[in-house]
Image (cartoon, grey):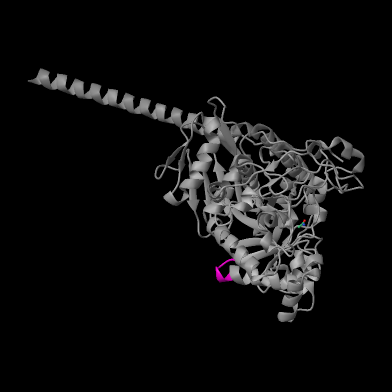
C-alpha cells in the first residue's frame, strides 16, 4: 500500500515537473514568438516609402504618406455591400492581371488583409472619398458609390502601371500606406468629341470613356450631328442616317483654309450609331459614373439633316452632306413642321439618354437664309422680334420649352446669349470667357470651354515645330502647360456669380483627325492637365509637380496602348 503511495507521489512529482517544464517551454516559445513578431512588425514599420510611390493625377485634396506597405496577392478579397458591386467588379477586373485572376468579391469577412469598399455618409462632399492603406488592409470610403469609384481610381495609380495589362502572369504587388481625403473642385468635368466630321466606332468611344474615368472626369459631351454627317439613328426619320450619315467625298488637306484650294477625294465616307449601340455606350459610361450629354445641333450645322429632309430648310435646296469644313449658310427654317421634326428627334434622343442636359448647339448660325426667307421674316413680324438674332433666340427658346416640359434642360454654345438667353439655359463659353461671364452675371449656369485653353484640336507645339505634327487646320497652338495654367473661374465675378461656373471641358473637333490614333494624340496629355484644373484645389496646383507626375501616368498610357504626344511629357522647358 505504502509502496503504491510512494510510486503515486513520485508520479505526481514527475508530472508536476514535466508540467512545469512544459509551462516554461511554452513561456519560452511564447516569448520567442513575441520577440519574433515584434521584430517582424517593427521591421514592417521600417518600410519607408519613396515619394515616387505617390504619384496621383489629379492631385488629391489631402494626402499623408505613411510607412509600411499592403501586400496584394491572389488571396486578397474585396469586401463590399451589394450596392457597391459595380465598383467592386471594376476593381477586381482592374487587378486581374496582377493576381492572375480577378480578386474575389465578398459581402462579409475580415477587413484584415483585404480591401473594404464602403459608403460613409459622414463624408462632406457629394463626390468625395477617403482612401486608407495600411499594411493590414485597404479601406475605400465614399459618400456615395461615385466617391468609392474615384477612390478606386486613386488606388489604381498607387499600383504599378503594369497592373493594367491583363496578360500579366501571376504576381504579387504592394501598395504604399497612405491616408487620402479627396473631392473635386468643380461639379462638371467634361470631355467633348465631334463624331460628325470623322466617325469613330463604339470600341473607340469606350476607350475615350475609360480615359475620362481614369482622370476622374464625369461628363462625355457627344457631338452627334454635323453638316458633314448625322450619326445617331432616329427610328422615325431613317433618312437621317441613310442619307445624312454619309458624304460622297472629303476635303483634302487644308482645303479652304490658309488660301489652300478646295480639293476632294471621291471616297464615300460615313457611319452612324444604332440605338442599340447608343444604349451600350450610355450603359458603359454609367458604370464609370460618366454622364453622356448628346448634342443635336440646331438651327445651324444642320446640312446633313437637310440633305435627308429638305422640307425643313429655308430653300428648296438641293442639299448635299458637306464634304468640306467650315460654316454653311444652310440652317433650319423656323416653321411648325421643323419644330415638329426636331421635337420628334429629341423625343427619341431623350429615350436614349437619361442625362439632365441635352446640348442643342446654337453656334455659328448664319442669318443670310432667314434674311432672304419671306417665311422667316413673317415669323419675326408675327412674334414681334427685332431681327434674325432674336429669331435665333425664339428658335432656341421653343426647343428649351419642349425639353423643359419633358424634365430636361438645355446647354448651348455661347451664341445663345445673342437675342436673349432662354430662361433655364446653361451656356458653354467657347469664343473666350466673355460669354461665360455674361451668362454668370445673368445667373445662368456656365461651362467654360474657351478656345484659348480648352480646344484640343489645336497644335500642341508652336509654329516652328508644327511641320513634325499631324496636320491641323489652324496654326494656333495650346501646350499642355497652357492648359494646366487655365483658371475656369474668372476673377471679375463676385462670390455669388462664381457659383454659376460649374466647371470646364476639353473640346475635340475632328476635321483634322481622320483616325482614332490622332484623336488620342491630340487629347493626351492635354486632358490630363485639364483633369487637374477641374478636380484639384487651386492651392494644390503646381506645374512642376504635375509635370513630374505625368511621367508616371504616361507609363500607364503605354501599358494601356494609348497614343499620346510624348514630346509634351518629356519636354522640360
Ligand atoms: C464651336 O467651336 N463652333 C463651338
On screen, 445 above or below 562? Answer: below
Which span is picked out in magenta?
404-408
217 lies left or right of 498: left
Q: Residue at x 58, y 66 (%)?
A: 408
On screen, 492 above or below 197? Answer: below
Considering the image in quadrants, where does the C terminus appear? Answer: top right
Name the foreground residue: 51 vs 364.
Answer: 364
Q: Residue at x 33, y 28 (%)?
A: 23
Considering the image in quadrants, where does the N terminus appear? Answer: top left
Q: Residue at x 64, y 47 (%)?
A: 212
* Res. 398 image quadrant: bottom right
Q: Residue 465: where, in percent of width, then height?
A: 89, 38
Residue 513 visible here = yes
* Res. 185 image quadrant: bottom right
**Which quadrant of the picture is home to ligand 1?**
bottom right
Q: Residue at x 9, y 20 (%)?
A: 2
Q: Residue 548: where, in percent of width, then height?
A: 76, 40
Name the foreground residue: 390 vs 547.
Answer: 390
Amino acid at each position: 500500500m505504502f509502496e503504491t503511495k510512494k510510486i503515486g507521489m513520485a508520479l505526481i512529482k514527475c508530472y508536476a515537473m514535466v508540467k512545469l517544464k512544459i509551462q516554461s517551454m511554452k513561456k519560452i516559445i511564447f516569448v520567442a514568438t513575441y520577440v519574433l513578431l515584434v521584430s517582424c512588425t517593427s521591421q514592417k514599420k521600417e518600410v519607408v516609402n519613396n515619394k515616387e510611390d505617390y504619384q496621383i493625377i489629379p492631385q488629391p485634396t489631402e494626402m499623408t504618406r505613411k510607412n509600411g506597405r499592403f501586400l496584394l496577392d491572389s488571396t486578397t478579397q474585396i469586401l463590399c455591400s451589394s450596392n457597391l458591386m459595380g465598383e467592386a467588379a471594376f476593381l477586381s477586373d482592374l487587378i486581374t492581371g496582377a493576381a492572375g485572376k480577378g480578386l474575389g468579391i465578398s459581402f462579409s469577412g475580415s477587413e484584415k488583409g483585404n480591401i473594404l469598399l464602403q459608403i460613409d455618409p459622414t463624408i462632406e462632399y457629394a463626390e468625395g472619398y477617403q482612401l486608407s492603406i495600411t499594411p493590414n488592409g485597404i479601406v475605400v470610403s465614399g459618400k456615395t458609390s461615385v466617391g468609392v469609384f474615384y477612390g478606386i481610381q486613386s488606388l489604381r495609380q498607387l499600383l504599378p502601371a503594369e497592373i493594367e495589362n491583363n496578360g500579366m502572369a501571376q504576381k504579387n504587388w504592394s501598395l504604399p500606406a497612405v491616408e487620402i481625403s479627396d473631392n473635386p473642385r468643380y461639379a462638371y468635368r467634361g470631355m467633348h468629341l465631334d463624331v460628325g466630321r470623322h466617325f469613330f466606332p463604339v470600341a473607340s468611344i469606350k476607350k475615350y470613356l475609360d480615359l475620362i474615368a481614369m482622370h476622374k472626369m464625369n461628363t462625355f459631351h457627344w457631338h452627334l450631328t454635323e453638316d458633314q454627317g448625322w450619326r445617331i439613328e432616329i427610328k422615325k426619320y431613317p433618312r437621317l442616317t441613310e442619307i445624312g450619315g454619309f458624304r460622297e467625298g472629303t476635303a483634302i488637306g487644308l482645303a479652304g483654309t490658309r488660301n489652300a484650294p478646295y480639293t476632294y477625294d471621291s471616297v464615300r465616307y460615313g457611319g452612324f450609331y444604332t440605338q442599340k449601340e447608343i444604349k451600350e455606350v450610355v450603359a458603359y459610361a454609367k458604370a464609370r459614373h460618366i454622364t453622356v450629354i448628346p448634342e443635336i445641333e440646331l438651327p445651324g450645322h444642320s446640312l446633313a439633316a437637310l440633305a435627308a429632309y429638305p422640307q425643313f430648310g429655308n430653300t428648296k435646296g438641293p442639299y448635299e452632306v458637306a464634304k468640306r469644313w467650315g460654316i454653311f449658310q444652310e440652317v433650319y427654317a423656323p416653321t411648325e413642321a421643323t419644330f415638329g421634326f426636331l421635337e420628334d428627334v429629341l423625343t427619341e434622343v431623350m429615350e436614349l439618354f437619361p442625362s439632365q442636359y441635352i446640348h442643342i448647339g446654337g453656334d455659328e448660325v448664319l442669318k443670310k437664309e432667314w434674311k432672304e426667307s419671306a417665311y422667316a421674316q413673317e415669323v419675326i413680324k408675327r412674334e414681334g422680334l427685332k431681327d434674325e438674332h432674336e429669331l435665333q433666340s425664339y428658335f432656341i427658346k421653343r426647343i428649351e420649352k419642349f425639353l423643359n416640359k419633358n424634365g430636361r434642360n438645355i446647354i448651348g454654345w455661347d451664341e445663345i446669349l445673342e437675342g436673349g438667353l432662354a430662361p433655364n439655359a446653361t451656356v458653354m463659353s467657347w469664343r473666350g470667357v466673355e460669354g461665360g461671364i455674361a451668362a454668370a452675371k445673368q445667373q445662368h449656369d456656365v461651362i467654360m470651354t474657351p478656345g484659348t485653353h480648352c480646344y484640343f484640336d489645336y497644335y500642341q507645339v508652336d509654329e516652328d515645330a508644327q511641320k513634325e505634327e499631324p496636320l491641323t487646320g489652324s496654326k494656333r497652338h495650346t501646350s499642355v502647360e497652357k492648359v494646366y495654367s487655365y483658371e475656369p473661374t474668372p476673377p471679375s465675378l463676385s462670390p455669388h456669380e462664381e457659383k454659376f461656373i460649374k466647371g470646364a471641358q476639353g473640346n475635340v473637333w475632328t476635321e483634322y483627325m481622320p483616325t482614332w490614333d490622332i484623336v488620342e494624340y491630340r487629347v493626351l496629355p492635354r486632358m490630363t492637365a485639364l483633369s487637374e484644373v477641374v478636380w484639384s484645389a487651386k492651392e494644390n496646383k503646381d506645374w512642376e509637380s504635375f509635370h513630374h507626375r505625368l511621367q508616371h501616368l504616361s507609363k500607364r498610357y503605354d501599358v494601356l496602348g494609348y497614343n499620346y504626344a510624348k514630346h509634351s511629357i518629356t519636354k522640360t522647358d
